[in-house]
Amino acid sequence: MPAHILVTGSTRGIGAAIVEALAAKGARVVGHGRSDGPGVIGADLSQPVAADGLWDRALEALDGRVDVLVNNAGVFEGVAVDAPADEWQAAWSRTLQINLQASADLCRRAVLHFREREGGGRIVNIASRAAYRGDSPAHWHYAASKAGMVGMTKSIARGYAREEILAFAVCPGFVMTGMADDYLASRGGDKLLADIPLGRVAMPDEIASIATYLALEAPPSMTGAVLDANGASFVR
Ligand code: NAD
């Protein structure tokens, strides 16, 4: 029986690679983006009610059974420390809402669903190296949102392992999700490569292979694990 999986933020980048890798393994996957499209349920996760609506629609699209939730949707939007206070707070709210609160809302629905059907299930949260290392001066909120995701993942793993509900997090470093030149320029150009012993940023299919392993194959004893994928740019 194929695993039924919801992947958020699947319209491009890492999410698109995860859907492709899961489908190649025979999973039945429903994707998600900001608006409806083929194989994609639209839900703007900056809106507080959106995650619940997304879960309901995904459950229906998957005939009432979700086995795995992959929380991948996220934003990386900077705000300067000397921005006006209202702008600063709006940026914090938006990043925490999309990256952390919406993920938490979906995890909550997944845990309730897994408990109700008594079959267990898996959650894979795509966090970031920033959770452990921190990020640039314009991205305190991004790092905080991803650290929150890691804490949440560990709490779920510890809280529900007995019920066969497993939770994992992935912490990528830089991942080439746009055109190479644009991507590198947006993250600091050649300087960023000098910080990566592997000599290059990760490719989306590398993160997808980790997420697919966690979603379908990782042994239950691994629950609560946080897997790094950063070319040894941050080793802990
Ligand atoms: P991306 O910008 O290419 O794609 C993001 C996805 O999230 C898209 O499908 C987009 O539609 C969705 N999304 C964003 N805001 C949304 C909203 N308000 N409502 C609904 N959907 C929304 O991003 P990516 O680089 O592929 O990143 C995917 C995940 O990996 C993110 O959580 C990101 O923080 C994390 N990550 C990325 C990198 C990197 O260098 N690319 C590094 C570490 C972690």
Image: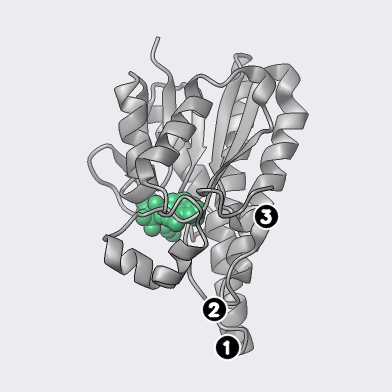
At label 3, counting other C-alpha atoms closer than 10 Å, the crowd grade (few under 14, some 14-19, many 20 or more) is some
Mark 3 vs 2, N-terminal side: 2
Check disc 3 and give the amino acid type: Tyr
Q: Is residue 84 left or right of residue 16?
A: right
Please say if 185 is above or below 12.
Answer: below
x and y percent of residue 170 in the render?
Answer: 56, 41
In the picture, the quarter occupied by the N terminus is top left
- For the point 77% across and 30% down, the residue is 159
Please say if 162 is above or below 88.
Answer: above
- C-alpha separation, residue under disc 1 versus residue under disc 3: 25 Å
- C-alpha separation, residue under disc 1 versus residue under disc 2: 7 Å
Question: Residue tagged by mark 1?
Answer: 83
> Of 113 and 143, which appears nearest the observer?
143
Q: Are marks 3 and 2 in contact (CB under 8 Å)?
A: no
At label 2, counting other C-alpha atoms closer than 10 Å, the crowd grade (few under 14, some 14-19, many 20 or more) is many
- C-alpha separation, residue under disc 3 versus residue under disc 2: 20 Å
x and y percent of residue 96 in the render?
Answer: 60, 61
Residue 4's quadrant in the figure?
top left
- For the point 50% across and 57% down, the residue is 196
Q: Which mark is residue 164?
A: none
Q: Which mark is residue 132?
A: 3
Check disc 1 and give the amino acid type: Ala
Q: Is residue 162 left or right of residue 49?
A: right
What secondary structure is marked by label 1?
A: loop
Please say if 99 is above or below 19.
Answer: below
Question: Residue tagged by mark 2?
Answer: 79
